[in-house]
Image (cartoon, grey):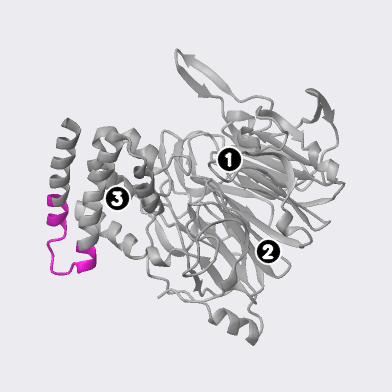
Amino acid sequence: MFGLTICFWRMVFMNGLFYMCILSPDVSPVRHATCIFFANGAALLNLFNVYNFTKRVEILDMLQLFIDYGEDEGSSICAKDTLADLVMKLGCYSSIILPLCLTILGATMSCEAPFVGAVLIDCSVQDGTHLLSKSILTLFDLWMNMFELTNAFWSVFIVLFPGIRFILDSLGYLVACDSAIISEDGKLYTWGRNDCGQLGHGDTKTKHKPTLVKHLSDYTIVNVAMGRGHTLFLTDYGAVYSCGSDKMGQLGQGTKGKDKLTPSKIDYTGKPIVRMACGADFSMIVDIGGGIWSFGSPEYGQLGHGTDGKLLEKANKISFVCEKSPRQITKFVEKNKQVATPITNVSIADVKCGTNHTIVLDDKSHVFTFGFAGYGRLGHAETKDEMVPRQVKQLENFRCVISKIAAGSTFCLAAATTKNLYFWGQTKSSGEATMYPKPVLDLSGWNINNIACANKSIMVVADDTVIAWGPSPTYGELCYGDGQNKSSTVPKEAKPLEGIQILDIACGFGHSLLIAKDLTPEDRERIAKLPRLP
C-alpha cells in the first residue's frame, strides 16, 4: 500500500507540474493530451517497477524511441541498457526523474533543413545536449516537439547540399551521434552531437545543420573518423588532426584529460596516413607503408599492444595506462589450440573499429581481430579477449578473397570477391551469438560494394540495391520508408531507394547517410520523388 500511495501522489505532482508547463495560449491540444499521457505514464512506470509487472516492458518498448545514449563516468546507456534498466536504476525516484532523463538522453530533431544537394538522410538521431541549464518549460517543449515528429523517424528525406564528394565513416553505437561530409573542394562540414567539441567548431553547441569547420579551411580534407566523443581528420598530405574528448588520450596529441574544442595535429612524425578508424574511446591510423598505429584506451586489449592497460591504483579502484600518442602495433599471431604463432611481414590495407574491438584486413586478404571478445564479435569461437591482432582462421576455410570489412558495436562483417558476405557476433539482445564467421545466405551471389554498420543495424550496397536489416529498436536508419516496419532481423531491400544509384553510405548510432548519383536528368528525377525536409 505504501508503494501505491507514493505512486498516487507522484501522479498528482506530475499532473500539476505539466499543467503549469502548458498553461500557454500557444500550446496545441495535441501537446496538452500528450503531456498528460506522459505525466501519468511516468508514475505508472514506477508503479509497475514496484510490483514487477511484465507489462512494464511493453510500455517501455513504446518509449524506447526516445533514448539515444548517455554517459556516466565513461560507461554508456545503450541498447543493452534499455529504459527498463534505467527505471530500475532510478528506483523509487523514477516517476520524477524519468521525464527529465528522457528529454536529456532522447533524440531531438530539427525541422530546419535549408540545404540543397544530393545527400540522402535517413532521419533519426540528433542529440539535444546541455539542456540541464534550461527551464522545465524548454525541456518540455523539446520533448513534445520530439514526440510530434516520431512519425517521420523512419522516412528517407533529401537534404540538398551542393558539391558533395563522399560521406565519411561514422560508426555505430559506437559512437557517433554526429555526422560529417566533405565538399568537392575538400571543405569539411559537421553537425550533430557536440558535447565534447568533437565537431571542431571551437564550442560545445549541438549543430542542427551542416556547418563549415573553419579551423580546417586551410586544408584539403579527404577523410574523417568519428568516435563516441572524438573525431579524426585526414588531409590530402596524410596528416591527421583531432578534436573532442581526450579523456583516454584518444586524440593522440600526447596529452590526456581536457577536451579539445578545435582540431590540432596528432603527435606523430611517421609516414603519411591513408586510413583511420575510431572506437568508442580509442583510435587507429594506417600509414602508407601498411603500418598500423593505435592510441587511446587500452581496455580489453583493443589497442593491440599485448595488454589491457589495467592498473590497480588502490583498493577497488582500477585505472588504465592509456596511449596518449600513436604507437605502432608490431605483433600479429595465428592460434592453433591456444598456441600462438607470430605472423611476419603484415601490411595493413584497411581497419574498422567497434565499440571496444578492432578488425583489420592485410594486403594478403587475411583478417585479424582483437579487443573485447564478448558475443563472439572477434570470430574465434571463444569469448577470451585478444590483446594482439589474431588471424580469423575460420575465414580461411571458405577459400575466398576478402575485399571489405566492417564493424558494429558487437559484430563484424567481411565481404568476399566470391559474392559472399560473412557475419559473426550478435546484433540481437537475445538468442545465441554467432561465434565464428558464417555466410549471410540472403546475400549469396550479390556483389557487395559498400558496407556500413550502426549500433545494431547493417546497411549494404549490393549490386545496385540498398539492403538493410537490424533488430528492434531501430530509429529509421534502415530506409524502409513511411508506413513500413522500422526493423527486420533478415536482410530487406530499402524500397524508397529503388532505382537510385547509391555511391557511398555511412552510419552513426541510429542514423545513416547516403550519397546518390545525380549526374543525369533521370538521376535527379528519381531523387526528386523522395520526400524533402521542410
On the image, the x and y values in percent for residue 100 come to 27, 47
* Residue on which disc 2 sits: 461
Question: Is there a contact, CB below 8 Å, between mark 3 and mark 2?
Answer: no
Q: Of label 1 and label 2, which has the lower sequence position?
A: 1
> Which amino acid lies under the numbered mark 3 shown in the image of this protein?
Leu
CA–CA distance in space, label 1 to label 3: 37 Å
Can residue 57 be spotted in the picture? yes
* Residue on which disc 3 sits: 131
Q: Is residue 461 above or below residue 440?
A: below
CA–CA distance in space, label 1 to label 2: 27 Å
- The crowd level at tag 1 (other Cα within 10 Å; few <14, some 14-19, many 20+) is few
* Residue on which disc 1 sits: 431
* Front of the two marks 1 and 3: 1
Q: Residue at x 45, y 39 (%)?
A: 76
Q: Of label 3 and label 2, which has the lower sequence position?
A: 3
The kind of secondary structure element at disc 3 is loop
In depth, the one of 317 and 434 nearer the eye is 434
Residue 349, labelled with which disc? Answer: none
- The crowd level at tag 2 (other Cα within 10 Å; few <14, some 14-19, many 20+) is many
Bounds of the magenta segment: 16-32
